[in-house]
Image: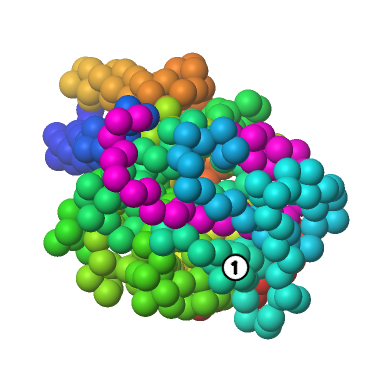
Amino acid sequence: MLALWVAAVLGVAALIALLYQGIAIVLAREMPRLGPAPPESSRGELPRVSVVIAARNEEDALPDTLATLLDQDYPNLEIVVVEDSSTDRTREVVDARAPRVRRVDPPPLPEGWVGKNWACWTGSQATTGEWLLFLDADVRTHPAAVRTVLDWAVRERADLASIAPRLETVGFWERVVLPFFMQLTLQRFRAPHVNRDGSRAAMANGQFWMTRRVTYVAVGGHAAVRGVVQEDVALARRYRDQGCRLRIAWAPQLAVTRMYRDRHEMFEGLLKNLSGSDHGSGRLSADIVEVAGFYLLPLGLLPFAWVAGNLVLLGLGAFLYVALFGKHAGFSESVGTQARYGLLYPLAVGFFIVLFATGVHRHLRRKPVLWKGRAYPIQE
């Protein structure tokens, strides 16, 4: 017969895991939502907004992104695409939309710079807007997106405002992994707490973020984080350290993006974000223990209780299955992926365990990060 103290410890551990996983739901509910604002919300003289897109080998995604930008209902808009030494037809895609879209060719990538940071910095220097909007080349926008986010930023007196687009998931692994990735992001960065002025939480979403030019220059812009792969978070921290006001919102109606085209690209894309000093081998090892301990081990309670013949633990284990699988199914559906893929969340956990383990290996072996044909050294 199972000792009472063992049953008690297992029961408490199961409840802790359940509460821990519930944090993502609480944070998701706290996250502000931003939808298209009515046209009359913009009054008076409209400040110039300069859109900067860093594009390297984006011939497939860029046409739709530019089409939606050209369809914006905000008249005082400048669009600059920094053509970052592409080997496909990206240059032709941009030039076909001149003069409404201007192509900028950056100088050769200096030593110590990440390619995207160099492109964004170069693009910012070539623009004239009072506000800068840094947009990824694969983000499609609602016609009111620029106006809505600018109105929101001005209303909130934000120095940096970013939104989280709806993630378009097409392939099997995208649908299984990316909703779980969003949960981890919510928890790691305490995303809604970014909107609290007294909080130390700091993050921005590099897919779509808008900033006052004067503040961008004051904090050093992309030049200040030139060698950082996860530049959006690093810049947000600089803004926070300077006492600037940050805002972030969930805006599935304003923008949509497909982050990765297949499982390999998704793995490498997520892996590159583990190259910074925030993700050393010790932290990544702790991440493995965390995701395995809180997301996988609780699932062992039900079969253990069945074998042990403990009815109390059996009932708790059954409740845990319903709560956890239901939670992941519901979260997947809430972000636009079918609920049935949330039921496969243990596969997503396994994906991240392999991802973190690969990150540990690369850090220990000092293997560089490879992304879009470039290699970047591991940062410690």
Camera-side residue of 201 and 78: 78
Camera-side residue of 200 and 297: 200
Q: Which image quarter: residue 124? A: bottom right
Say how many tags the image has.
1
Relative to 125, is 183 above or below? Answer: above
Asked whether residue 27 appears in the rendered view, the answer is yes
Relative to 320, is 224 above or below? Answer: below
Asked whether residue 348 appears in the rendered view, the answer is no
Rate crowding at label 1 as few (under 14), some (14 to 19) or many (20 or more) other CA atoms within 10 Å: some
As drawn, the residue found furthest toward the bottom would be: 111
Which amino acid type is marked by label 1?
Answer: Ala
Camera-side residue of 141 and 20: 141
Please name the residue shown 31% across and 39% down the image: 42
Which quadrant is home to the N terminus? Answer: top left
Q: Position of residue 254 (x, y in %)?
A: 44, 33
- Write down the region rendered in magenta: 39-68
Camera-side residue of 317 and 151: 151
Please name the residue shown 56% across and 33% down the image: 71
Q: Position of residue 9 (x, y in %)?
A: 19, 41
Q: Is residue 238 magenta?
A: no
Please name the residue shown 70% across and 49% down the image: 99
Q: Which image quarter: residue 283? A: bottom left
Q: Is residue 79 left or right of residue 283?
A: right
Relative to 361, is 344 above or below? Answer: above
Q: Is residue 47 magenta?
A: yes
Q: Which image quarter: residue 371? A: bottom right
| Residue where numbered disc 1 is placed | 126
Colour setting: rainbow
Q: Position of residue 205 (x, y in %)?
A: 44, 51
Q: Position of residue 107 (x, y in %)?
A: 73, 75
As drawn, the residue found furthest toward the front would be: 44
